[in-house]
Amino acid sequence: MSLLAKRRGNEEADLNVTSLVDVTMTVLIMFILIAPVLEQGLKIEHPASDAVSSSENPEEPLVISLTKSKETGYGVIKLGNTVMGPEKPFDKLYQTLCEMKAQKKDLAVIIRADADFPYEYVIRLMDAAYSAGAAVGLGDK
């Protein structure tokens, strides 16, 4: 074995981390100097608004519920506490919501349905409410 081969085998790689430590310390010092300025922040005065805030005039949305009747076992559609008739309840709901929409500019409803009913009925309730011009949301039972 030659002398050149012995030197190559005994060499170890050495990583110089001095510049990495210098950069890290510089960034750390910058954060220490800037942090107190960031905590203070700036005071901003918002312009006054003439609009009525929603907390001053809270209007509860109407609740449309689809539940199973205990007596008959069939589905019952209620708008608030009013039961939509046994014949064509979706049409009755649509007519009632149209009448309410004519009286009230912003009409919002929440639909709540039992888990026993097929999704098709919930879609039909949503369709009746959208067609009447109401904003629709889904709620849990």
Image: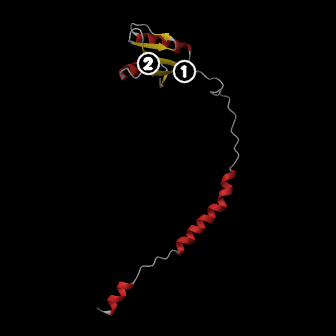
Q: Residue beneath label 1, please?
A: 61
Which of the numbered marks, if any, corresponds to residue 131?
Answer: 2
Residue drawn at (44%, 13%) of the image: 77
Residue drawn at (56%, 69%) of the image: 23
Q: Where 58 sits versus 77, above or below?
A: below
Q: Which residue extends farthest front?
A: 70
Whole-percent x and y of residue 61?
Answer: 54, 21
Q: Where 50 sits versus 34, above or below?
A: above
Residue drawn at (60%, 68%) of the image: 26
Front residue of 95/72: it is 72
For label 1, the crowd category at 10 Å Cα-Cα, with few meaning under 14, some 14 to 19 and many 20 or more, is: some
For label 2, the crowd category at 10 Å Cα-Cα, with few meaning under 14, some 14 to 19 and many 20 or more, is: few
Label 2, secondary structure: give it: helix
Q: Is residue 3 left or right of residue 99?
A: left
Whole-percent x and y of residue 87?
Answer: 39, 7
Please, what is the three-letter code of the amino acid marked with disc 1?
A: Pro
